[in-house]
């Protein structure tokens, strides 16, 4: 059966439509070229009018009359000057043409020679990982085109890659952590060391987005944070990881910084914290920061395993029950903490059974802060005492309903020396200082989405609360104010946050010892006057007689701070 020819309107219609469309486009381009000056001047007049309206809106009402008088005077002078209106019109057109010019920057055609060489070398380095011999149309091959594999890229001022989108074949095993780690390590090494990179894997689109993270601020000093009583600020992180900011004071300026907030109390799922790091990484700084925030609403017991006096500024302050650095004192404090936890549980349980609210003494938070508790493990074994870590089992297991929070900080190399209750019940984790990817994953339970670097400032690390994401962390600067090497501004910031000294109870005084005899004298009664008999010269008539006694006032009594059991 012979085919019928198509109607003429259908066979030539597409050509006529294309020709008409081309003519219309040419006419529009010609009109745009001819009317371009008029379009520019019109755009400029519109911008000048908008600027005038903004200026009028910003002018206070009491000054608008003077502004109108000034404008009217200028218009009158221009009208009276010879050729004034013509010159004013020319000036207005010139200003409009300048304001209406096209300000869009011309986009670069592509990377320069050095940038192309860097992208090409990165492409060649990825060929062994993203290529297969069975692929008929490989995306990665030696000598291939890198522009198909890298659709988006950006460089910083130093010529290094700041952002990159990498396409990879669908058969790459992007679901395996080891395969991902190899690619991330390679990209970080080829893009430039000494920076932290953030990797975003899109398994559905077979794309990997690489971005360079800016450094976290290290100049934020300790201060009062706008939080609730059950919230503790561990530090600050990237704005893309959290959806909350805190107003902070930095010198005379104020800025909003995203924090890492740790929630404690009855409704917390991570009631206890474990912080590990290398020496000098800032774990003691973290404990001081937590102590200053905890003293606003609770009591604190501090154990200093380092014995360097890092917490001497907290001794004798309101709310600080004890600052222990010896084995005997640490053991006694931990036994008291276990007993206090049991007492709170019993009191709260009795109140619940009676249908009453919990007593007030069980609602006040109790914080137990331990710095390097593993230092007492060997001492306790040598002295035949009980390991203080074992006494933490009751506060760790039952601390949440009793409002008891335990924070343990130790060195990263001493993690194996920590007791099983400490490692099991501390679901909030912090790692400060340089650490390998394996160490971070073993402590945090998940690898970070950034590449760890070797050189980090003090207080810099990672944090993970329970099963949440891994955050970059920068602890606020909370140094020891008694350290001579600390800047004065940071010392004053810490001293301003310290609570006042504890006022001793009435009657808790002891008299000064007699240095001549070397034996303490008995304290006078409360009703007796504060005087003591001293020996006077013997009379001449009785050389062997006992010396007479005279009255002499005592010096000021010495106050003694005691802790109630």
Image: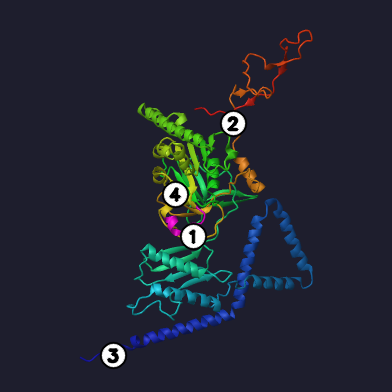
Are discs 3 and 2 less than 8 Å apart at CB?
A: no
Q: Is 325 drawn above or below residue 523 in the view shown?
A: below
Are discs 4 and 1 less than 8 Å apart at CB?
A: no
Point out the tag, 4 or 2, that comes first from the N-terminus. 4
Q: Is 473 drawn above or below residue 37 in the view shown?
A: above
**Which residue range is magenta in the image?**
432-441
Q: Specify the quadrant of the image occupied by residue 308.
A: top right
| Res 29 visible | yes
Q: Which residue is mark 3?
A: 5
Q: Which residue is mark 1?
A: 452
Assess whether residue 125 is covered by the magenta stretch: no
Q: Is 362 drawn above or below residue 458 in the view shown?
A: above
Assess whether residue 440 is covered by the magenta stretch: yes
- Distance from disc 4 to disc 2, alpha carbons, whole Å, reads 36 Å
Q: Which residue is mark 4?
A: 415
Q: Which callout, 3 or 1, points to the residue nearer the camera?
A: 1
Left or right of residue 132: residue 377: right
How many marks can you see? 4
The picture places residue 213, in percent across and down from the top left corner, at 52, 61
Point out the tag, 3 or 1, that comes first from the N-terminus. 3
The picture places residue 459, in percent across and down from the top left corner, at 54, 51
Q: Secondary structure at mark 2?
A: loop
């Amino acid at each position: 059966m012979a085919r019928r020819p198509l109607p003429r309107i259908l066979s030539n219609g597409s050509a006529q439509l294309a020709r008409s469309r081309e003519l219309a486009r040419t006419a529009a381009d010609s009109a745009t070229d001819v009317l371009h000056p008029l379009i520019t001047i019109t755009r400029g007049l519109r911008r000048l009018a908008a600027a005038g309206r903004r200026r009028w809106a910003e002018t206070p009402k009491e000054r608008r009359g003077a502004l109108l008088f000034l404008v009217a005077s200028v218009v009158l002078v221009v009208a009276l000057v010879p050729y004034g209106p013509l010159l004013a019109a020319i000036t207005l057109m010139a200003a409009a043409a300048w304001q209406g010019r096209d300000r869009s920057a011309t986009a670069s055609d592509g990377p320069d020679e050095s940038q192309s060489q860097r992208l090409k070398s990165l492409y060649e380095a990825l060929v062994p990982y993203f290529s297969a011999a069975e692929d008929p149309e490989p995306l990665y091959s030696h000598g291939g085109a890198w522009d198909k594999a890298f659709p988006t890229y950006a460089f910083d001022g130093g010529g290094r890659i700041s952002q990159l989108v990498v396409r990879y074949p669908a058969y790459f095993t992007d679901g395996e952590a080891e395969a991902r780690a190899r690619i991330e390590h390679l990209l970080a090494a080829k893009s430039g060391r000494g920076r932290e990179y953030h990797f975003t894997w899109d398994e559905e689109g077979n794309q990997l987005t690489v971005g360079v993270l800016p450094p976290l601020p290290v100049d934020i000093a300790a201060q009062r944070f706008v939080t609730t009583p059950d919230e503790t600020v561990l530090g600050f992180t990237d704005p893309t990881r959290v959806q909350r900011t805190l107003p902070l004071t930095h010198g005379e300026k104020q800025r909003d910084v995203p924090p890492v907030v740790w929630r404690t109390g009855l409704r917390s799922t991570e009631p206890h914290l474990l912080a590990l790091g290398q020496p000098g990484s800032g774990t003691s700084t973290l404990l001081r920061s937590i102590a200053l925030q905890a003293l606003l609403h609770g009591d604190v017991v501090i154990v200093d395993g380092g014995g360097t006096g890092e917490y001497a500024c907290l001794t004798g302050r309101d709310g600080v029950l004890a600052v222990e650095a010896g084995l005997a004192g640490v053991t006694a404090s931990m036994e008291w903490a276990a007993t206090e936890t049991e007492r709170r549980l019993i009191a709260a349980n009795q109140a619940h059974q009676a249908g009453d609210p919990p007593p007030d003494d069980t609602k006040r938070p109790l914080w137990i802060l331990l710095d390097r508790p593993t230092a007492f493990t060997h001492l306790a074994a040598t002295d035949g005492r009980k390991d203080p870590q074992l006494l933490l089992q009751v506060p760790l297991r039952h601390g949440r309903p009793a409002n008891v929070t335990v924070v343990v900080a130790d060195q990263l190399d001493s993690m194996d020396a920590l007791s099983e209750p400490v490692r099991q019940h501390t679901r909030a984790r912090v790692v400060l200082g340089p650490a390998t990817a394996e160490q971070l994953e073993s402590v945090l339970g998940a690898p970070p989405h950034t590449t760890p670097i070797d050189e980090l400032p003090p207080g810099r690390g990672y944090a993970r609360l329970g099963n949440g994401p891994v955050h970059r962390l920068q602890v606020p600067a909370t140094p020891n104010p008694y350290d001579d090497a600390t800047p004065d501004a940071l010392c004053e910031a810490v001293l301003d946050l310290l609570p006042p000294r504890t006022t001793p109870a009435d009657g808790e005084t002891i008299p000064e010892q007699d240095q001549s005899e070397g034996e303490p004298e008995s304290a006078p009664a409360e009703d007796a006057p504060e005087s003591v008999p001293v020996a006077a010269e013997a009379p001449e008539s009785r050389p062997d007689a006992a010396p007479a006694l005279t009255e002499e006032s005592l010096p000021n009594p010495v106050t003694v701070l005691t802790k109630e059991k």
